[in-house]
Image (spheres, rainbow, N blue to C red):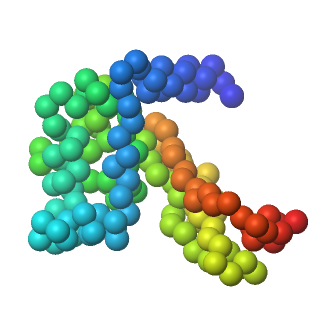
Amino acid sequence: MNLATKDELQDTITQMVQRGKGILAADESLPTIAKRFAPIDVESTEENRCAYRTLLFTAPGIEDYISGVIEFEETLAQSADDGTPLPEVLARRGIVPGIKVDQGKGALALSPGDLITYGLDGLAARLQRYKSQGARFANKSEEMKKYSCGVFCVSV
């Protein structure tokens, strides 16, 4: 790793771990955000999702409490009403834009009832694209359950 990359990583870490601030998970998948919108009778269109995220990211004083935001892939390509890309909206407020890199869950072969999280295939190329779109950190979620055998027996 070259010195510039090390410095960039350290700057990102320093900015994200500020005392009294947290990370906002605004990485709802399309089905999840549709569930959020349903009770308030808002259709889950790209335009409405962008308006919702813009509202979150431009809330007065958000930078006083939030140091980083985990975004859904769609968000990296969206822009605020003035044309500013949403990751840049965050960065201008001193908030580190990040990206959710897992791509959903599915059945684990040979292990009925167990799930696996997708997203490692092609990750390196996606990370390069995400960085060019303004993301400075990545988050991968994994469902963990207590197994009697399941995943561990299949992996052995």
* Quadrant assignment for the N terminus: top right
Residue 125 in sight = no
Relative vertical location of residue 100 with respect to residue 153 in this rendering, above or below: above
At which x and y percent is residue 62?
Answer: 22, 31
Relative vertical location of residue 131 with respect to residue 108 in this rendering, above or below: above
User: Would you say 132 lies left or right of 57 here?
Assistant: right
For the residue pair 7 and 146, the one nearer the viewer reads as 146
At which x and y percent is residue 106?
Answer: 58, 74
Q: Which residue is drawn at 44% across and 27% down?
A: 16
At which x and y percent is residue 142?
Answer: 58, 56
User: Would you say 13 lies left or right of 155 here?
Assistant: left
Residue 155 in sight = yes
Q: Residue at x 34, y 71 (%)?
A: 31
At which x and y percent is residue 156?
Answer: 88, 66
User: Would you say 24 lies left or right of 110 here?
Assistant: left
Q: Residue at x 41, y 20 (%)?
A: 18
User: Would you say 83 lies left or right of 76 here?
Assistant: left
